[in-house]
Amino acid sequence: MNNSSAIQSKNLTVEFDTKVIISDLTLSIPYRSITVIIGPNGSGKSTLLKALLGLVPYSGSITLFEGDMLNLNIGYVPQHTEFDRTIPMTVFDLLRLSLYQKSPKNQLQSITEALKELDIEDLAQKPLRELSGGQFQRVLIARAIQDEPKLLILDEASAGIDYVGVKGLHEVLKHLKEIHNTTILMVSHEINIIPEIADRVICLGHGYSYCGEATNALTQEHIIRLFSEKVKWHDHHS
Amino acid sequence: MDFIQAVIQYEFLQRAIISGVCLGMLYVWLGLFTYMKKMSFYADGIAHASLLGFALGWYFKQSDFLTSILSAIIFGCLVYILERRTRIGNDTLISILFTGGMALGIMVLYLLPGYKPDLLAYLFGNILTITQIDYIGISLFSIVTIALGIWHRDKLTLVFYDPIEAKLKKINVEIYEFLFYIVLSVSIILGVRLMGVVLISAMLILPTFISMLLCSNLKQVIISSSIIILLIVTIGIYISYSLNLPTGPSVVIVGLVLVLLSLVKQKLS
């Protein structure tokens, strides 16, 4: 295994009660890469992300950024949020909270840039309770990227976003990787996006896992082993 | 006019108003986070469960104020630990502790030999009987806690609104939450002195709830809740003094009228 990987896990196992969600997973993700995690429902994709973030208990080892946690800035968009949107808070307020260590001037600059990247500058002063599901999702992505994270973790972040929005999001992710050297890890059910943006793929199935180059991942064999059936996907080369 | 003259003349009224306003301002901050964490039932539970501390104070001939605070802190710690160590739902857990604390408290009072304390005063409070020591304690605790709340306002808001994001920002969420449980428990007992066990959570929740209906951001909520608590406390004490009515219920009824007006305004807009 490469010692200078951005994310390394060795024999990672996550159990809830007596149910094993992830078993003995060893993986390595390089710096400045986009990794897409695919797999059927209940295969442990979100749990893997939570384990990497230290949000669920696990056994085995996880090393992020060679252990330099003090300087590691993480952006995260969870699959489900438990925000009480009846609490009066504007988009600007929500984004500002995560930047509490910055000066008001720098907060304004970071928030403005992030909202512009997601093409939602007009939502800045809108109360959260007035946002649609797709708009709220974009706000959460803006919050995750506003502080130029070194590690960006997205759990089905494009759910509820329209086609143009998803395309825009992919451009933002590529830009973050190229310009800010961000390492990106994302769960998606859209296998089609892999040829477009992924450098690496993690396939998580029930009792099966694969972590490797994106170009090798999209084989019929992997897909069949993952989903136990033939899946058709659009091949951008064809 | 009579009321203003009375306030100038009588020290007990000055103490009542200053204590009520200080505690009210503290509740503005605590109420916001209590609302975010959906902990209004916790406040109610702690107030009721502290009857055990009150009773033990009488039984062992110690200050019932201090034993109530101690018991509230112990109940707060118990809820905090059991919430995280067991699978019992938060509301069930509080119900068990709440009724358990009350039942034990009543039993201790029943077994108390000789003179028994006035339970009605404990249940409904009396803001007009605030002593000089109560007044100094309430004011100091409120001012220090409000100052700390203002200093840590962004961190606290992040911890209570989005604890996962707070953890990723390397904030020690558990410590903040634990301290909040303790501060809220102590504040509730300070308030019980004024408003009684039955009515105290109204003072914590009503101003925040009204502001949540009317405002569009958190800054407005804080300002609006502060104005509302000033109105509720002063008008409530005024009505109580002028019409010779019990103070706690008067304060709560003024709050309820404001809730109704806010709901009507929200419906109309």
Image (cartoon, coloured by chain):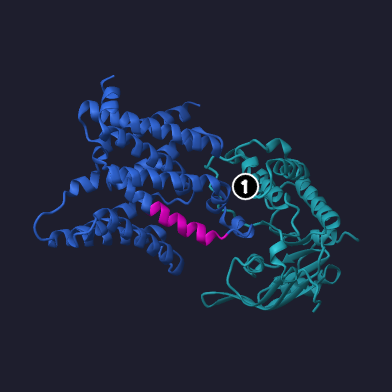
Chain colours: A cyan, B blue
- Identify the image quadrant of residue B185: bottom left
User: Does residue B42 appear in the picture of this structure?
Assistant: no
Magenta-drawn stretch contains B181? yes
Q: Residue at x 64, y 48 (%)?
A: A100
Q: Is residue A102 left or right of residue A233?
A: left
Amino acid type, residue under disc 1 in the picture? Leu
Q: Position of residue A188 (x, y in %)?
A: 72, 60
Observer able to see residue B211: yes
Tell me the magenta residue range. Answer: B172-185
Quarter of the image where one finds residue A48? bottom right
- Which residue in the structure is indicated by mark 1? A97
Residue lying farthest to the top in this orientation? B1
Instruction: Report crowding for label 1: few under 14, some 14 to 19, many 20 or more residues within 10 A (C-alpha).
Output: many
Who's the residue at 64% across and 41% down the image? A91
Q: Is the residue B258 above or below the residue B136 in the image?
A: above
Height in image: A207 above or below A164?
A: below
Report the residue at 28% width, 46% height from top: B193
Image quadrant where one finds the N terminus of chain A: bottom right
The x and y percentages for residue A180 are 82, 55
